[in-house]
Amino acid sequence: MRQLSWFAGSLVALWALDRLLPRVLNPYALQIVMLCGVNVMLAVSLNLINGFTGQFSIGHAGFMAVGAYTSAMFSIHVGQPWVASMVALGLPAPVAQGAALLVALLTGGAAAAVAGYVVGLPSLRLRGDYLAIVTLGFGEIIRVVITNVNAVGASRGLSDIPHWSSVFWVGLGALTVVLASLHLAGSCHGRALFAIRDDEIAAEALGIDTTRYKVLAFVMGSFFAGVAGGLFAHDQTYLNPSTFQFIKSIEVIAMVVLGGLGSVTGSVIAAVILTLLPELLRPIKDLRMVIYSLMLIVLMIVRPQGLFGSRELRLPWRRRTARPA
Amino acid sequence: MSEFLQQLVNGLTSGSVYALIALGYTMVYGILRLINFAHGDVYMLGAFFGLFAARALHAGVDPNPVKALAVLLVAMAGCGIAGVIIERCAYKPVRRSPRLSALITAIGVSLLLENGGRVVFGADPKFFPQIIPSRIISLGGGVSISNQQIIILGVSLTLMILLRLLVKHTRVGKAMQAVSWNPTAAALMGISVDRIITFTFMIGSMLAAAAGVLVALKDPKIEPYMGMLPGLKAFVAAVLGGIGNIPGAVLGGLVMGIAEVMVVGYVSPTYRDAIAFVLLIVILLVRPAGILGRNTTEKV
């Protein structure tokens, strides 16, 4: 009951923000807010794989791309005609668009989850850096394939995606990912993931089905990455394969590591910081990325465990729940 | 058949360059268990150092083999120093940190070199002077090879043999092997682990610099982001051969170069960048530790 009222309250707050932000912020600032939301989803979802389960994945942009392209294609070919017919029948446009977006996002997420399953399978055989390089390779393969498929615009990119994302939807997506991850962290499934991260052999000896949980982590992480990609697609209204280069995966990893592996709130804060930082540095032009990379190096030297380690930032009035470090 | 042989020649040439870069990855990995993401950018630095040396020596105006060799050596020395600086300033402080933080540091260094290079060298591509004029030599049967390709093959082979001699037959090389086997035990035997690690970075960076100059001989357009993709592919080559394994890196590089050229020749040039990774996934599924890598069993 209490959780339900929390959830309803958040919905109302998001709706209010959705109305308010476009009025007070200029389009550029609004765009950055949306990007923050998408990056929070990406960082937290990667944290499920890297931070919770200790499986080193550096191909997150690939999952995002699968979700983005699938949901965009779905909206263009199925969603838009459906919305048009529903509006003709008298359904209010925002409701019809919202419903279509929701279905498109779930489709994109499901496609990414399937991709995550396919990549998760080799993780049964590979460990550590070998797995990392396979996920990297997978991400690159996805990108090259997209660049070569004419139906999705190939290297020209995919345009005319309906602009259905809004602060409300991005906020809802980010909130869902964060709450789901926090919930997972406290559940027995989450503990199983932590156990695998800390010592796979010991975890197996304790009767944890490590294979199943590793694949589960991949599937969940890539599902949310796919949804984030879908939101991104419906916000930008244009997708280009070069967006999903290796460097995008790297950005997301930097967020996870900076926030602290295994810390959901850490990922959230780091995602916001690392999204805002390059934007704030924009006035110094060419030096921008130099400063950004220097800060990354210095932060890693000063705080190698990330901003929060594996702890969570908690609201002081909420009950503390014990959690393995 | 002659087309196939021609492709093979081209593949071997680009493969030997991948092998040179892959050697740096594999040596650093073997000793530190660190994926040195900045290695591809050291290769870029090598090409630029070579460019500056060639300009200073006027090697493009009046090409002769001595100047070409000098350009190569200057680039290697410059990158050797750069490698030492990178290791001392960025990697040494995070050596005892979790491996992922070390990796992020490496990525930070990579971004720093790329974007710093953009600021210092400018974003527009530079033209590398023809320090050795191109000449095509026919091998008969419709197969031909350029003198630059011969130089690339020759120089890479020489460097690989030198590396092999260094690792197998000198005190420093044996110390490198010892550190890669077990750093703690090596330190107890009186080996200065820090110095060996720095030395490894230096050697790896020098090989990357050589690769940079050799590539610039053949494709004279150089720019600050040129190291990204070759670096990534060379790393894949190192993994392919079994990372941490020196002959493996050479083999992986050659396999990669040949596979890429064959895909361009017989399938489609647009899939050139994907083949590296497809090959990787296929090989790792069959041999999870790479072609020459030894599968370690984990003991409890």
Image (tube, coloured by chain):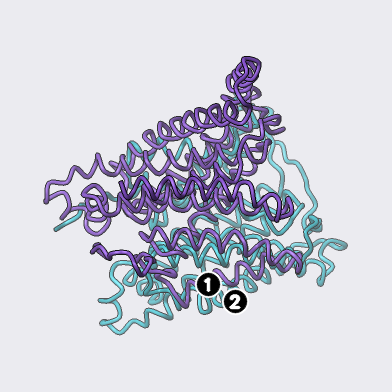
Q: Secondary structure at mark 2?
A: helix
Residue that lies at the very extreme toward the bottom in this rendered image: B190
**Residue drawn at 37 percent across, 44 percent down:** B291
Q: Are marks 2 and 1 in contact (CB under 8 Å)?
A: yes
Q: Quadrant of residue A237?
A: top right
Quadrant (top left, top right, bottom left, bottom right) of the N terminus of chain B? top right
Amino acid type, mark 1: Met
Task: State the residue in front, B68 or A37.
Answer: A37
In the rendered image of this protein, which colour is used for chain B?
Answer: cyan
**Position of residue B298 in the picture relative to residue B159 (left or right):** left
Task: State the residue in front, A106 or B281.
Answer: A106
Among the chains, which one is purple?
A
Say which residue label 1 marks.
B202
Task: State the residue in front, A282 or B7.
Answer: A282
**Residue drawn at 52 percent across, 60 percent down:** B37
Say which residue label 2 marks.
B81
**Residue drawn at 55 percent across, 51 percent down:** A37
Quadrant (top left, top right, bottom left, bottom right) of the C terminus of chain B? bottom left
